[in-house]
Image (cartoon, grey):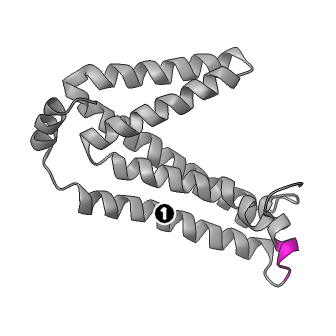
């Protein structure tokens, strides 16, 4: 690996995915927040579409954007909450699954945790995997709890707020 601060870049894939997923979970508890998150998600998908190298990726991205646009206009964006929530949960759970698969159950010789263990040889790579796993789960639970605490409006109240605000 060249460039960057290895202590930051090595866990960034696992923990970054969990953090983004937790933010999407948080936004999924409110219709207006889901609309804002879907705009950001659409921009990221369009960037992915620009850099896609095969047709399957392009088709999947276009379908994902199409579903998002359709959900935006159905019932003033109420289904968009579940779309954003689904993407957040999938991002968090994939990160957790990837950590468990790569670092705890089977050891990938050149995993990020193995490289991280070389930086800090006192702690083995599997322990780093467990630490990153716990941080990922904490991010996910934090997104759920913060969403429950911040957005206490009922579905009907969220729908009326979504109708009155223009995004």
Q: Is residue 60 left or right of residue 150?
A: right
Q: Quadrant of residue 18?
A: bottom right
Q: Residue 82, can we see it?
A: no
Q: Main secondary structure of the magenta part?
A: helix
Name the residue at 16% across, 41% down: 158
Q: Would you say residue 62 sits in the magenta stretch?
A: no
Does 17 sit above or below residue 49?
below
Does 59 sit above or below residue 164?
above
Is 102 in front, or is 70? 70
Q: Position of residue 115 (x, y in %)?
A: 85, 65
Q: Position of residue 13 (x, y in %)?
A: 67, 53
Q: Quadrant of residue 102?
A: bottom right
**Disc 1 secondary structure class:** helix
Name the residue at 56% across, 69% down: 135
Graded by Cα atoms within 10 Å as few (under 14), some (14 to 19) or many (20 or more), the crowding at tag 1 reads: many
> Which image quarter is the C terminus in?
top left
Q: Position of residue 53 (x, y in %)?
A: 74, 20
Residue where numbered disc 1 is placed: 139
> Which image quarter is the N terminus in?
bottom right
Does 153 sit above or below residue 100?
above
Q: Residue 125, can we see it?
A: yes
Name the residue at 87% across, 58% down: 110
Q: Position of residue 162 (x, y in %)?
A: 19, 34
Q: Is residue 120 left or right of residue 88?
A: right
Q: Quadrant of residue 156?
A: top left
Does 66 sit above or below residue 34?
above
Q: Please state the extent of the stretch shown in magenta in the rendering.
A: 117-121
């Amino acid at each position: 690996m060249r460039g960057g601060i290895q202590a930051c870049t090595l866990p960034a894939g696992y923990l970054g995915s969990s953090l983004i997923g937790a933010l999407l979970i948080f936004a999924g508890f409110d219709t207006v927040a889901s609309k804002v998150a879907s705009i950001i998600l659409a921009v990221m998908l369009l960037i992915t579409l620009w850099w896609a190298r095969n047709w399957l990726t392009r088709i999947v991205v276009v379908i994902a954007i199409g579903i998002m646009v359709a959900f935006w206009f159905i019932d003033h964006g109420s289904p968009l909450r579940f779309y954003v929530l689904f993407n957040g949960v999938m991002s968090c759970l994939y990160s957790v699954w990837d950590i468990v698969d790569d670092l705890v159950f089977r050891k990938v010789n050149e995993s990020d945790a193995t490289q991280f263990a070389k930086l800090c040889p006192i702690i083995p790579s599997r322990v780093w995997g467990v630490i990153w796993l716990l941080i990922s789960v904490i991010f996910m639970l934090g997104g759920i709890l913060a969403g429950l605490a911040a957005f206490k409006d009922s579905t009907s109240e969220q729908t009326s707020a979504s109708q009155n605000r223009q995004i």
